[in-house]
Image (spheres, rainbow, N blue to C red):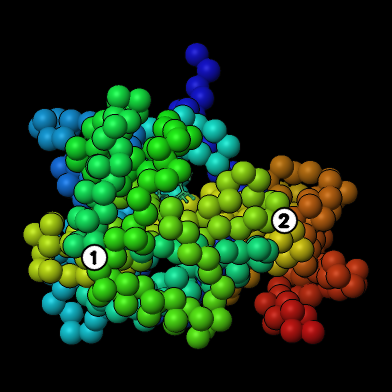
Amino acid sequence: MAYTAPRGTVDLLPQDTRKWQYLEQLLRTIADLYNVKEIRPPMFEHTELFNRSVGDTSDIVTKEMYTFADKKGRSLTLRPEGTAGVARAYVENKLFAAADKPVKLYYMGPMFRYERPQKGRQRQFHQFGVEMLGVEDPALDVEAMLMAVTIVQSLGLKNVRLVVNTLGDAKSRQAHKEALKKHFEPYLGELCHDCQERFEKNPLRILDCKVDHDHPAMKNAPRTIDYLTDEAKAYFDQVLALLDDLEVSYVVDPNLVRGLDYYCHVVFEVISDDPILGAQSTLGGGGRYNSLIEELGGPATPGIGFAFGMERLVIALGDQLEEEEEHLDVYLMPLGEKGKNLAVQIQAMLRANGLSCDMDYQNRSMKAQFKTVDRMKANFAIIIGDDEVDQEVVNIKDTRTRNQETVALEDILAYLEKKMEE
Ligand code: AMP
């Protein structure tokens, strides 16, 4: 039997992981700028956590979770998203007791959803996400949005757009919910099975439906923006005014709802029309959630967060890294058995002093080994023949200048360090 990776998963090979490492480093650097600290919750949680927080009418919970019983019969689920685990950890570890708010956290890692795989859609994919907990303030919402925009801009993407909307506070949401029910009731028989269930539990989600997307009733459905309380409207206006002050360009899209149960007030997405992304133009999004922490047993705690799909960010990186070629400091070229033993020792000494090294283990000719020096882009080649071993010297070739010199064993490190400074 030939083994293949499970459907919807991919192997990231060395030529890919270089890009991933670059992206991860970039994200960590931006997180540092915003004083956001890393949190690493587990990759599986009790199933109930996701039912409760993501919402049991969401597509994620109803169709896409990898749920299994462990040997004791507990129902566990591979995390389909990051916010629920972070919120659970925040409550369980009493992070709400911190004196300084907001508590700003980021996570980065694989997520699992049973979806139909296609370009840009996998069953194991990765997200980078940020949660800022403990403060409700338009200025913080704007900080989160600015961080999201900065990430995308730092990847060099063009035509980046911030799309924002508000779902309002609990009162506005309730009024909107009632209006939605009234609006969709006459068409209920024409909507898909899922939407009929959404109608009862969370009619806002009907607007997000992929099946009924083109149903005529969608076009003139009531918009959240028309049902805002004065307070909710004032909050949103402040967010927009701050974005204006910071000269962050945005568009308000009254149809942006983002269907997760826990959102309220500001929701946003970062979109780019850069051709490199093809059809997958939404890089990430998020919004404010003010009841999630309480719902999970913590004190009333407002929060705002966002998540990016990292596969899309890697696509956005394109071939920007091609210029920054990888290289090796030293390649050791033993030309005989005695040379090999010495090479092993020199290699260990150089690595202990911070130089990256590799050596020939295949007893190949000098010509073949020099080809490896080229392929690995080694800055120095150390050639060690049996004669050199007897004389306690090596030949060091600087591949940049093509100069070759004979160096005593005890001088190798000092010689290389001096050359590397030149
Ligand atoms: P969501 O948690 O559904 O709001 O997704 C946030 C982001 O994660 C999306 O904008 C995508 O970039 C990415 N994403 C979600 N699901 C997948 C998937 N199955 N495969 C790859 N990326 C995904």
How many numbered callouts? Answer: 2
Residue drawn at x 34%, y 34% is 64
Label 1: how many Cα within 10 Å (few below 14, some 14–19, many 20+): many
Secondary element at tag 2: loop
Task: Answer with left or right where residue 208 lies relative to residue 185.
Answer: right
Most extreme residue toward the top, as rendered? Answer: 1
Q: Amino acid at mark 2?
A: Asp
Task: Answer with left or right where residue 217 lies relative to residue 409.
Answer: left
Label 2: how many Cα within 10 Å (few below 14, some 14–19, many 20+): few
Question: In terms of image quadrants, where is residue 350?
Answer: bottom right
Q: Amino acid at mark 1?
A: Asp
Label at residue 422 = none
The answer to whether mark 2 is within 8 Å of ligand 1 is no
Task: Answer with left or right where residue 227 lies relative to residue 413.
Answer: left
Question: In terms of image quadrants, where is residue 353?
Answer: bottom right
Q: Nearer the viewer, residue 208 or 337?
A: 208
* Position in image of residue 81 (x %, y %): 34, 49
Q: Is residue 46 visible?
A: no
Q: Nearer the viewer, residue 381 or 235?
A: 235
Task: Answer with left or right where residue 112 lies relative to residue 422.
Answer: left
> Mark 2 — residue?
319
Label at residue 169 = 1
